[in-house]
Image: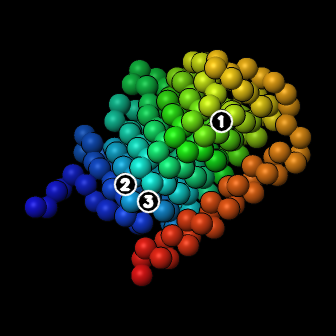
Amino acid sequence: MINEHFRYAPGGGKLYSFNGIWPTLGQGVFIAPGARIIGDVEIGDKSSIWFNCVLRGDVNHIRVGKGSNIQDGTVVHVEGDGAATLIGDNVLIGHSAMIHGTIIEDRGFVGLGAVTMDGCVIEGGGMVAAGALLSPGKRVRARELWVGRPARKIRDLDDGALEGMMAGTIGYQKLARKYLKEYSD
């Protein structure tokens, strides 16, 4: 049976239309098997969406910049009455995170299992630690580390931490290229 509501993406994940709108992908994007990208979602060049992620742009839009990675099992959704989800360039989102109606600026970082809620902003170079819960409307400023449930600022990040965040992002860009090559042979 041919299903006109989904297509396979580079890497084997699935793209689904919703309300007549298809996701759009830049050059060199990797969508891993099991990942589902639905509706009004744009993913920039060389970004990667890993195994079993769901990006659901049904009641608002999702934008992912260039070189970003959204790791295994993460869910990205939107708020219908206002809060789209905007993810900048070179953003790293760890495994099993929940990103809802949030803005993550360039080089932002969200750790494994963290939750960000409607109206949150993570400025460039800001970090939400693994397992943290960022309550609605919170702003993580550049170079801040937020931890806990509910999350709060515990300290500023030094240059080494920022370099480590970028190294993780670059590592995922390289890994995605390897997967694209292997899965396209």
Residue 174 placement: quadrant: bottom right
Report whether 37 appears left or right of 29: left
User: Crowdedness of circle 3 by 10 Å Cα count: few (<14), some, many (20+)?
Assistant: many
Which residue in the structure is indicated by mark 1? 130
Classify 48 as above or below 85: below
Report whether 127 appears left or right of 132: right
One can see residue 118 in this view? yes
Which residue lies most toward the bottom here? 185
For image coordinates 81% across by 46% down, the residue present is 162
Classify 79 as above or below 43: above
Q: Position of residue 125 (x, y in %)?
A: 76, 40
Which residue in the structure is indicated by mark 3? 32
Local secondary structure at mark 2: loop
Residue 184 placement: quadrant: bottom left
Which is more foreground, mark 1 or mark 3? 1
For image coordinates 29% across by 50% down, the residue present is 16
Mark-to-mark CA distance, 1 and 2: 23 Å
Of the pair 28 and 51, the residue shown nearer to us: 51
Mark-to-mark CA distance, 2 and 3: 6 Å
* Residue type at tag 2: Gly
Which residue in the structure is indicated by mark 2? 34
Q: Position of residue 169 (x, y in %)?
A: 68, 55
Q: Position of residue 2 (x, y in %)?
A: 13, 61
Q: Earlier in the sequence, mark 1 or mark 3?
A: 3
Mark-to-mark CA distance, 1 and 3: 22 Å
* Residue type at tag 3: Ala
Q: Earlier in the sequence, mark 1 or mark 2?
A: 2
Tell me, what colour scheme is on the image? Answer: rainbow
Local secondary structure at mark 1: loop
